[in-house]
């Protein structure tokens, strides 16, 4: 009988320690104090607490297009500086922002144009052409496109994180979403405090 009482006392003591380990030490014995202690220690997910769950698509083609726009300007300046003439440098297809076309180079200077393009841009672009039509095509390399897309997604995540942090939302989830290309998962739990 005495052994049974000791076992029951031990079980009750372990349960009390577990409960206080989960909810912490309340500031009082009232129901409100216990509720506050539990909400501080137990974090409810979106399914229990409510909030917003968003999946955002990052338009990375615009970043690639902006990069090739800058490259078009640099190529124009480089060829002018090297006294190599051309009729136009442009992006031929809006659906393929990684392509740049150089047209109207002087027939006898095609080798110089190719050397200028490959010397400065071969790290990021594949340079083709220079045949009878005296035109060249620069195609952004796949690893460069991938790196630019990843950088764009990371910048978008940082921008969203900065904006959410200024709102004072506790425990937001802002990360790359693994089920789609160039997507961001944003989870914002409902806030119990008012935002000014």
Image: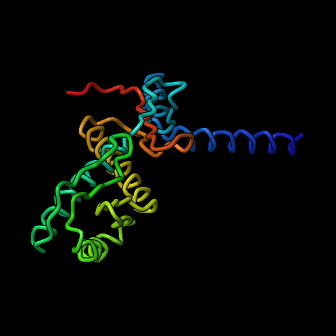
Residue 150 vs residue 88: left or right? right
99 is higher (above) or lower (below) than 85: above
Residue lying at 50% horizontally and 43% vertically, measured from the top left: 181
Name the residue: 48% across, 40% down.
Answer: 25
Compared to 91, does 125 lie above or below?
below
Does 52 appear above or below 166?
above
At 41% across and 34% down in the image, what residue appears? 56
Locate residue 152, reporting x and y percent. Answer: 34, 50
Residue drawn 55% across and 44% down?
Answer: 178
Lateral position of residue 90 relative to residue 10, left or right: left
Of 94 and 151, nearer the camera is 94
Residue 104 percent across, percent down from the top left: 21, 59
Q: Position of residue 83 (x, y in %)?
A: 10, 72
Q: How many marks?
A: 0
**Would you identify the image quadrant in which residue 93 lies?**
top left
In which image quadrant can residue 145 be found? bottom left
Quadrant (top left/top right/bottom left/bottom right) for the C terminus: top left
Where is the N terminus found, in terms of image quarters?
top right
In the depicted view, which residue is nearer to us: 103 or 66?
Answer: 103
The x and y percentages for residue 164 are 30, 38
Q: How is the image coloured?
A: rainbow
Direction right: furthest residue: 1
Choose between 63 and 100: the one closer to the eye. Answer: 100
């Amino acid at each position: 009988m005495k052994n049974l009482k000791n076992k029951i006392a031990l079980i009750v003591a372990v349960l009390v320690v577990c409960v206080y380990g989960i909810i912490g030490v309340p500031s009082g014995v009232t129901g409100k104090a216990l509720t506050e202690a539990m909400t501080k220690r137990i974090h409810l997910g979106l399914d229990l607490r409510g909030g917003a769950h968003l999946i955002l698509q990052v338009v990375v083609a615009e970043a690639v297009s902006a990069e090739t726009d800058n490259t078009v300007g640099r190529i124009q300046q480089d060829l002018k500086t090297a006294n190599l003439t051309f009729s136009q440098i442009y992006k031929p297809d809006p659906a393929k922002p990684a392509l740049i076309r150089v047209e109207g180079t002087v027939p006898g200077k095609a080798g110089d144009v190719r050397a200028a393009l490959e010397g400065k841009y071969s790290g990021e672009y594949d340079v083709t052409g220079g045949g009878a039509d005296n035109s060249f095509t620069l195609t952004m390399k796949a690893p460069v496109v991938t790196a630019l897309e990843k950088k764009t997604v990371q910048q978008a995540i940082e921008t969203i994180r900065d904006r959410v942090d200024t709102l004072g939302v506790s425990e937001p989830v802002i990360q790359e979403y693994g089920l789609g290309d160039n997507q961001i998962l944003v989870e914002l739990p409902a806030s119990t405090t008012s935002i000014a």
